[in-house]
Image (cartoon, helix red, strand yellow):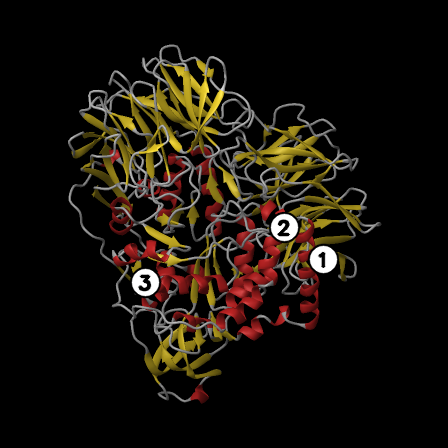
Amino acid sequence: MHPPRSHRSMFAISQSLLAISAFFLLTGAKGQDPGGASSPVAPSNGVYRGATLAAPSFTGSPAAGRINGLLDPVREFTLTLTEGTNMAAAPSPDATRIALALQGALYVVPISGGEARRISTWSMEVTHAVWSPDGSRIAFQNYDTEGNYHIWTIAPDGSNATRVTTGPFDDREPSWSADGSRLIFSSDRSGDMQYKIWSIGIADGQYQQLTTGAGAESHPALSPDGTKLLLVENGGVVLVDLVTGARTSRGAGSAPAWTPDGSGVISQGGGSWSVNGVPVNAASEDLFPFPARFLPDGRFLYTGDGKIRLRTTTGESVSDVPFSAQIALRRPVFTPKAQHRLDDLDWRTVKGISAPILSPNGEKVAFVALNDIWVLSINGDGQPVRLTDTRDYKASPGWSPDGSFVYFSTDRDSGGVLAVDKVELSSRKRSRLVLLTGISMAYPSLSPSGRQLAYWTGGGRVEVYDLAARTSTVIVNPSLGTGVSRPSWSSDERLLAVCDAERVNNRFREGYNKLRIIDINNKTAVFHAVGPTPASISERNEAGPVWSPDGRKMAFIMDSLLYVMPVNLDGSPSGPAAQLTTYAADMPSWGPDSNTLLFMASGHLRTLNLSSRATHDIALDMQYKQATPAGITIIHAGGLWDGVTATLQYNKDIIIDKNRIIAIEPHGTRSADTANKYIDASGLTVMPGLWDSHVHPLDVFNNQAYGLAWAEMLAWGVTSTLSMGGDLYQSVEVREALDAGVLVGPRAFIAPPLYDGSRVFYPSARAVRNEQVAELEMSRMKPFDVDLLKAYVRAPIPVMEIVARTAHELGLPSFSHFLSPGIQTGLLGTSHLSATERLGYSWSISTRYQDVRELRTHGLFNMVATTGSSQNDPVVRGGGLVTMGTDFPLAPAGSGLHTIMREEATTLGAFEVLKTVTINGALNARVGNELGSIEPGKLADLIAIRGNPLENVANVGNIVYVVKNGLATTPEEIRARFTTTRALTQRAKALDAFAKACRKEPEWCHPPAMAGH
């Protein structure tokens, strides 16, 4: 999901603080979309004007037992692939057959070409296949159900599939020794954060580490005599003498292999193959990242340009091996769920209870709900006391040591960062506790004495602020640069406990969420595992750890369950963690007796007594209503683009009753006097409100100006956002605040955390290591009426299937980063064309080749595009459903969507681009019967702009009115809180602080290095 916080602290501030200036840049831009508008094309799936669209028909329905377990309604069919993207191929030793790894499946193809026969099951994720020297086995790299890569072998007929390597490690890129007795592979099993080369004996299963020292090594190839090793490191080919240990550089390149006699090296680089550094072919091919494989006749086989190819080492002869490979699919047929949340205008129960924390005397709970701070008595009548009543963003409440005040993070008058305010319980007086100009104070935590405040910045640094001296001190940086949990103090105030991810190796970004104990005075930190590998604290936002007041226990969430682990006074574990619940739990908080825990249990505030295991549900009665106008609103539209047709209508009146469009009539059909509100847009064009279909705005650290980010989206005409992953309780809280109008911004269609594997990267990624944890996660989110589910980078196939199945049962869209195995597991689509992959490369990096085009257009697999107009065009033209999203905060709030629209219009044309941010966005979110177009019966989300958007999409930036849920406003009114003299002065100070910090530490000010959520 998000870029590393270590490279985002100041970068994010600059995006936030300059967001308003982007408005003037974009609205002043001109330009013409080439190509004009095309005829309207209905999406190939989804719901369109309330009717289910027909999917294309295919021949060959596969057996139900051979593909995923989605229940009806489903559509079963097969597709035929004749090209491949980043497919791997290897010839049999007798040069009669080819092992082909294509879109995660393993096939065998005649070397003369023809029909490919699949030999792997759908639940395998196969790549890097290579034939054994005797032809009896095919070795390959497979992502196991446990969430790790291992080396497997299989017979050429598909029998006797066997896992060769085991353990909580990633083993990749297999190759055989010349005698077939050993498999050579790259691995992180050395446990020292290095990626080195290993071998395993086929007969005895004994591992041997072949290389040592620092370095990220890959793609090993053992010489025929077994004395030398080729590998890739730092973008170059290295030759290692296994006898002497000497290393020799063979120059820049990748995917090395030995010539058959072991005298030469063939490798690729710059689009060409080279033998001993001499190019074999012109640098014009799109070579796939796998070694060349030699045939007995001296030719070599490889993959590139979507083809299986044979070439001589002289380059004089080249030919393609044609193939056709069938892929069996069972895809969900969507049944619309009743959108009760959108329809319901009555009082609703508040479900978004964020960051609850017990008071020092254990009698009250402070929490965030509806964008305000509340306090609730543990044994009261369920009626909480509201401590704040303002629209500034608020998060992470905490108690003073004596319980006299509650403090929290806020963006009020802070210049675009998070400051810390407090409210006295006795007087309800609110005042500022700390503001650090240009630096956010997320997850603030007062020390037991109340003299120090620990927090972490938007960039993830853990800092401590001395309230008396009014100075801040940097303590440590996060391990991965992506943020840690809320700091928890030791009783003697010498130490802090956080959850941080300890990276596993130096080649891939993920790590295990561990307990990290920070020594404040020494500015050092030590990691402690919370259980045997691959144990991981569930996430770094809503899962702890929290240190007990007596210093002897640590509470946290692991495998989605509540655990308590005994610890020494230095925070190190003194025994194994004990499981306290059999149901999903979140956000633990200690009582003063170190024997009582408060936590959330699927929406319920609950306490647990450690001694007796007795639980107590805390009564809470909170309700809210959607913000809607009263009566009738009439909008006189000079021009109307309805989001469906390719032309404008003219001189129309749009009649809105509260929040729903009831009629579209010729102007003047009914008198303006009949309206409670009348908007004269006779000189404007009215069109549907925009959709940003890929955002991550639901964590306090995602952007340094939280409230401003939401407001900017709405001011730029974005009336609906689709989250691709965020903390569950905070996401629900923000959605309800936006619906209630107590936070200014668009609709938020929310997702729970990213469902990842045991290794994670982002703080809000949930560690889901097996099916049991996945089922707990599904039970955890169901009470909250979420809008989307997303399986993330390292989610194993069984977890992806559970996510897909649950989403299908609930009528929700579901997404992944992967075309494959996402499409095979039953997920709805991808949140990018291509993004971070567990492979290290992508099977869907472009739409250049037939396999990706076929699966995306005929495979009923949606795509949210964040950029890349030339890549999106084939999918759109082929009838696939494409929507647009910014992957916020990787792009500026609101204005970033307009930038992408203008880029896409250069190839798609205005009409198709406009659909991707209106009706397609609603269809993709499965609310096309409620939103996305201007039609009677739909909800009133629309914008009024100057100019014709069908002539030039840049006109969409000329926004005069924004209507969300029937409530009409202007960009100036939306931005009012952020454009006062005081707010602009604070912002100027923050920009100055940002500039000074960049001069002092330039490395903190460049764009993120590993962007791509």
- For marks 2 and 3, the one nearer the N-term is 2
- For marks 1 and 2, the one nearer the N-term is 1
Task: List x then y, in percent, for residue 368.
Answer: 63, 54
Q: Are marks 3 and 1 in contact (CB under 8 Å)?
A: no
Up-down relation of residue 904 to residue 334 (above or below): below
538 to the left or right of 298:
right
Say the numbered circle drawn on residue 458.
Answer: 2
**Residue type at numbered disc 3:** Leu
Residue denoted by label 1: 437
Residue at left 53%, top 26%?
533
**Residue type at numbered disc 2:** Gly
In this rendering, which labeled residue sits more in front, label 3 or label 1?
Answer: 3
Task: List x then y, in percent, for residue 850.
Answer: 25, 46
Which is nearer the eye, 400 or 242? 242
423 to the left or right of 691:
right
Residue denoted by label 3: 908
Asked which secondary structure carries label 1, the reply is: loop
